[in-house]
Amino acid sequence: MPSHAGTPLIEARGLTRVYHRPRSSLTKPGAAVEALREVSLTVGRGERYGIVGESGSGKSTLLRLLCGLDRPTSGSIRFDGREITGLPERRLRFLRENLQIVFQDPMSSLDPRMRVRDLVAEPLVALGLPVGGRVAELLEAVGLPAEAAERYPHQFSGGQRQRIAIARALAPRPKVLVADEPVSALDVSVRGQILNLLADLVDELGLTLVFVSHDLSVVRHVCETVAVMSAGEIVETGPVDDVWAAPAHPYTRALLAAVPTLEGLL
Ligand SMILES: Nc1ncnc2c1ncn2[C@@H]1O[C@H](COP(=O)(O)OP(=O)(O)OP(=O)(O)O)[C@@H](O)[C@H]1O
Ligand SMILES: [Mg+2]
């Protein structure tokens, strides 16, 4: 696909997403929840963009919209200069090829009945791309032995499973890697390793990263830019070191006062 070097890679404008809770009575409609309210953001090519906020602030909702997995109630999203809002799935192929996701829990994101070989090759097969020697190459890139290809997810530790999920996400050579709390479900002792692996791969492959966490110290470790979310809105955004050193919004200060859990582990 021709890329439009002058335009930002991801440009979201005025994203609002309203969910309707199931109705609790026959006569009253279900309550509306505004999970996102007028959120705008711009992610440049090669930028490492972090989104931080407490539970329920709308981080995953925003990611789902950016990945074309859900539609906004209003607002627009451009990926590489192309509007994706409202496009049917069959016209989102360019997005599926160029943007891949790593989820929080590799145990539920990896099908337990599939061998690692097939799990890693699956995105290529789904897109009709050649598999060739790509699985071996990817396992090596994420620090797993070649024999891992013949095994099943349950035969690995949590950290190794997340390595498999990263290999799988990188398979179609995406431009953008999106990660939603990729280390939160892992044992504290392996979080640093997986974050360093992600950061190294993003660097080596020149990827754009959109990274969600509830922990600003984690975002600071892998991102250069941060957007702070609270109650469905971005309340502060800027270079992560600036926000870390001098948070402007009271909510960011409160987030920072919560123990920086990764300090000393990385
Ligand atoms: N499918 C849904 N139906 C109804 N409400 C939803 C749905 N998904 C999310 N919400 C609501 O939208 C708000 C934002 O949720 P979201 O999952 O985006 O938060 P989050 O920041 O990712 O939280 P967490 O850190 O716990 O993952 C919450 O109030 C949540 O209850
Ligand atoms: Mg979430």
Image: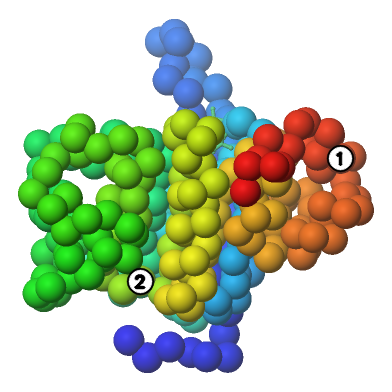
Side (left or right) of 230 relative to 58: right
Q: Residue furthest top?
A: 25
Q: Residue at x 34, y 59 (%)?
A: 142
Q: Name the one closer to the observer, 80 or 22.
A: 80
Q: Is 46 left, or right, of 107 in this rendering?
A: right
Q: Residue at x 47, y 40 (%)?
A: 190
Q: Position of residue 85 (x, y in %)?
A: 44, 63
Q: Amino acid at mark 1?
A: Arg
Q: Residue at x 22, y 70 (%)?
A: 137
The image quadrant that residue 42 belongs to is bottom right
Mark 2 is surrounded, within 10 Å at the Cα level, by few (under 14), some (14 to 19) or many (20 or more) other residues, namely some
Q: Position of residue 207 (x, y in %)?
A: 47, 73
Which quadrant is home to the N terminus?
bottom left
- x and y, in percent, of residue 114 in the image: 10, 43
Per the rendering, the mark at residue 253 is 1
Q: Position of residue 182 (x, y in %)?
A: 46, 45
Quadrant location of residue 54? Answer: top right
- Report the disc number at residue 174: 2
Left or right: residue 69 compared with residue 181: left
Instruction: Determine whether 214 is above or below 48 in the image.
Output: above
Q: Is residue 233 above or below residue 136?
A: above
Identify the secondary structure beneath mark 2. loop
**What is the distance, in whole Å, between disc 2 and disc 1 at their CAs?**
35 Å
Most foreground residue, 163 or 106: 163
Which of the two labelled residues, at mark 2 and mark 1, occupies the earlier sequence position? 2
Tag 2: residue type? Pro
Q: Say the numbered circle drawn on residue 70.
A: none
